[in-house]
Amino acid sequence: MKNLLKLFSIIILIITSNSFSFAAEKVEYLKTDWSFKGLFGKFDRASLQRGYQVYTEVCASCHSMKYLSYRNLAEPGGPEFSEAQAKAIAASFEVTDGPNSDGEMFTRPGKLSDKFVMPYDNVKAAQAANGGAYPPDMSVLVKARGGGVDYIYSLLQGYEEAPSNVSLDDGVYYNKYMYGNKIRMAAPLSDGLVEYGDGTNATVEQMSKDVTTFLMWSAEPHLESRHQMGFKAIVYLIILTVLVYFSMKRIWSRVESEV
Amino acid sequence: MSDHDYRPKSKAGQWFNDRLPLLTLANHLTDYPTPKNLNYWWTFGGILTFCLITQIVTGLTLAMHYIAHADMAFESVEHIMRDVNYGWLIRYIHANGASMFFLAVYIHIFRSLFYGSYKSPREIIWILGIIIYLLMMAAAFMGYVLPWGQMSFWGATVITNLFSAIPLVGEGIVTWLWGGYSVDNPTLTRFFTLHYLIPFLILGLVVLHIWALHVPGNNNPVGIDIKKPSKDTVPFHPYIVIKDGFALLMFMIVFAFFVFYAPNILGHADNYIEANPMVTPAHIVPEWYLLPFYAILRSVPDKLLGVVAMLSAILILAVLPWLDTSKIRSAVFRPLYKQFYWILVADVLILGYVGAMPAEGLYLLVARIATAYYFLHFLVILPVLGFKEKTLPVPLSITEPVLGGSPNLAAARNKESKIE
């Protein structure tokens, strides 16, 4: 048994040391207490709803979120807006549909089943409107960046005056957490930019945290059920392992060999 | 297959068994005499069977929802993650399952290296194993391409481009592999087809691998031939079944931890960006399990020779039974080999580490030294060691001590427990 523990600790050591080796270039990211980390991590519902507000009022003017549907906003494990609220949100967007029986495209108010409406029709249009830079789709953005939530959270607060030795072109900004420090997005947040319905003070830090929480959910909409199922699965496996261990001891006691 | 004198008890069983001896096979598998001193390193064969079946079952399910088209592959993966019932679970098991599969296969291979399981009369088992390992790498590489993320696309570009190193026909071969003039939709659809095919080839080879194993029987930590069945053996069922089951459960706990709590830690963030032929990622790195070979590839300045070195690094294993000249199997009785064995383990880990780093400066130097040592181990150290090494006396059986007490067996047991 002792040997087994040793064996598995070696395995875990090898795996973790291997994965650490990927984290090559390192900047210290800002840290905050994410409610969704850990074995029982869950999203902070109010933060998700505020985060959606920041996304839709600020980010959504340039960044699409094409893999999400309005119905997701009312689903369990997410912001959990009521169905009526989600319907109202969907209806506030104009969706192009068609062709109708006359062969014409037409617009109608959004429905729960519609995907999030994109700010630009295509990548080229997005680039044209943003000085050649494409604002990335935000659906899985958190998983598409090495530093994950900490990186996004830091980046949103990482705008600074460029040091004197760095020269910036027009439309390029200095951000101490950005790879290469140069970013084509102007600082998107400023204190009081949105007005939270629940009275929370909309500081840059608060908005960064809320919108990053929202992005984490959009990238991992089933995170809560994953954590819950994981805990049950591992507890079940541990109990079964213990039972099998004692059965094994009993069976092997018939021969004098050690297990 | 040893004893054919088995006869089913029931009339119906006898009738069936005379026409198709499946019951004889089942009886052989349950009674199969196994050395009773197998340690936990021997449980990885069963664990690997579990990994293969898990990959096939989850893979079939994913294939029902995945769309192999350059414009839709990435989206269909997101569809699986979001809208398919428990799609996230199935995909995370499949993606992490690949890593777990390789983790287990590396332990399995290094167990064989330590205890000399590849030596006569088990060469065919070993060679079948190397072919399985090669097919696993092909399957894993092509599977990584399917989500059509940035690493998928650029990994496929880098690896397929290796074939262009072949003189004269190289460029033609690459175009043929791609089905066009760049990695594109035809590449994706053929990779999907092959990714679907290979696991079943592996399954067939696994059957042969186990069949070949059941002819001479298992090697064991002492590395001696034993009489079967005898006091040295136990029947496969229930003894080995329960022990393998216990080890498998321990393995599944580690597996579950990754699936539920760190599902993306072994992957690369860039693969959540949809493939874009116009943008090259800053670092193109393969999955962790291919890194040692990637390091060998990059440590050779010439492209063709680099490819040759990388392939030789794997194929050299196939001739290992003839490179290792020592008659003694287990490293327990080979004091020098044991030290070189651990140096080799360290060497491969170092290669894996530098494989993940940029190929420049100190990293490149270390990669070159480690590559040279890798080949030195197999081509020089092993053949010479067989002649020069003073091995420890080997016991005659697992249970019965050598004449006049058993100092060696006691030593062997001590050392084994240290290794475990």
Image (cartoon, coloured by chain):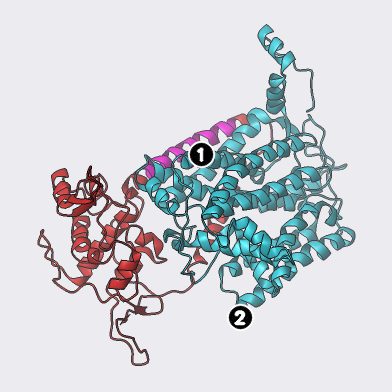
Chain colours: A red, B cyan
Q: Quadrant of residue B377?
A: bottom right
Quarter of the figure that contains the C terminus of chain A: top right
In the image: residue B247, left or right of residue A115: right
Quick check: is A238 in the magenta stretch?
Answer: yes
Using the image, tell me which numbered label, if any, was put on residue B60.
Answer: 1
Q: Which residues are magenta?
A: A229-250
- The lab-note entry on whether marks 2 and 1 share a chain reads yes
Q: Position of residue A127 (x, y in %)?
A: 33, 71
Camera-nearest residue between A213 and A248: A213
Instruction: Looking at the image, tell me whether mark 2 or mark 1 is earlier in sequence order.
Output: 1
Q: Quadrant of residue B398?
A: top right
Q: Nearer the viewer, residue B291 or B162?
A: B162
| In this view, B225 is above or below B188 | above
Observer-nearest of B235 and B56: B56
Q: Which residue is located at x 69 percent, y 13 percent?
A: B16
The reply to whether residue B100 is visible in this rendering is no
Q: Amino acid at mark 2?
A: Gly
Residue under pointer 2: B361
In the rendered image, residue A256, in percent from the top left (x then y), is placed at 69, 34
Q: What's the magenta bit mostly, secondary-structure-wise?
A: helix
